[in-house]
Amino acid sequence: MTVPAPSSRPLNLIWRRSILDGVLEAQFLRDVVLSKLARPVRWVAIEDNAPLPTMDDVLMCSFGDCGEVLRGFRAAGRRNIGVLHLGDERSTDDVGFYADADYVLRHYHRANLPDSGGHCRSVTWLPNGWASGMGPVAANRHLNFHERRHEIFFAGHAGTGASPLPDREAMLDALKNLGRPATVILTEGFGQGLGTAAYAGYLGDTRFALAPAGNAPETIRFYDALECGALPIVTQSPWLQDTGGAAALGLPPVVVLDHWRDLTTLDAQNLDEDQRRQALDWWQRFKDLTATRVAQVIEAAFAA
């Protein structure tokens, strides 16, 4: 795939400041997802109570429905209006507003989305990527597989009675029957517990990073693990096997279980530095593919 020659016409990312403050993957978006664009990228942060500027060549960054904003841009005669749809982990957002955009980039793989309709020419899934502060980590800074002290590691929230996370509950049940050491740090809620630097330190010293589903099968911890050189363990889901999702370059060479109870059958002796390097190579190629796809979508909108 090729990326067009450079252009001086900028892309304007428009954020409400509270949204930008709440996006864990802002650095990944800047340094990976948008890295192959052949033009300047401007980040425009607007206070929550301030009117949005009406501009051409906009990528509107939003949690949920921003159709009213998009229609306002069009009523003002603006052109080349894209959307970066954040969130929607549970795949419950009404995505009818996609028709008001020229193109859509979205987090969280969701089956049966329309490819186009109304003004929209394409809908493209983006991997969440590592959280700011977790990367980037050059591969030559990784400990190799056998230098890592933690064989199996998980840190995070496992749900509550009012808000259960069944895949994480199943993972914890499997760990009780594992019969060998695992490092588990449970937290009271989202974003609590280990700080970013400490979490990256643990993952950088981990062989197998457990990446159970949260509100969605795809979780940021999957990418955090890869960026820190750990081999993720996940359970089967359509996101992993869809060529519009993680399988665009073939099935990711990570550890995929049918169920967490199969964790007891994990043969760590047959998974070594070669397997880890295969996963890291896949991750690098997948980041490159993502950046190229995004550049093609955005450049096509500029050319239209």
Image (cartoon, rainbow, N blue to C red):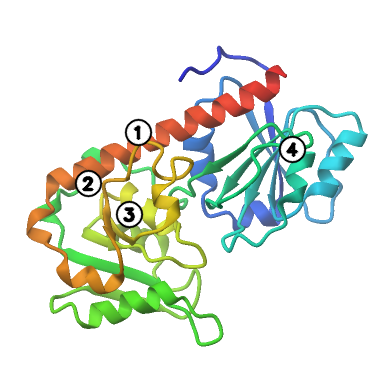
Residue highlighted by disc 3: 225
Return the residue at label 2.
Answer: 142
If you read the primary sequence from the N terminus, does the residue marked by circle 1 or circle 4 appear first?
A: 4
User: Mark 3: which amino acid?
Assistant: Ala
Q: Amino acid at mark 2?
A: His
| Residue farthest along the front direction in this orientation | 112
Image side of residue 193 versus residue 62, left or right? left
Q: Which numbered disc flags the more N-terminal residue, 4 or 2? A: 4
> What residue is drawn where x is 73% and y is 44%?
98
Front position among marks 1 and 4: 4
Outermost residue toward the left in this view: 269
Q: CA distance from mark 1 to mark 4?
A: 31 Å
Kind of residue at badge 1: Arg
N-terminal of the two: label 3 or label 1?
3
Helix, strand or loop for disc 4? loop
Lower sequence index among marks 1 and 2: 2
Q: Quadrant of residue 101?
A: top right
The image quarter in which residue 81 lies: top right
Residue 171, given in percent of the width and then of the height, sits at: 32, 74
Which residue is nearer to you in this view: 51 or 112?
112
Residue 217: percent from the left, percent from the top? 45, 61
| For residue 27, above or below residue 293 | below
Q: In the picture, which quadrant includes the N terminus? A: top left
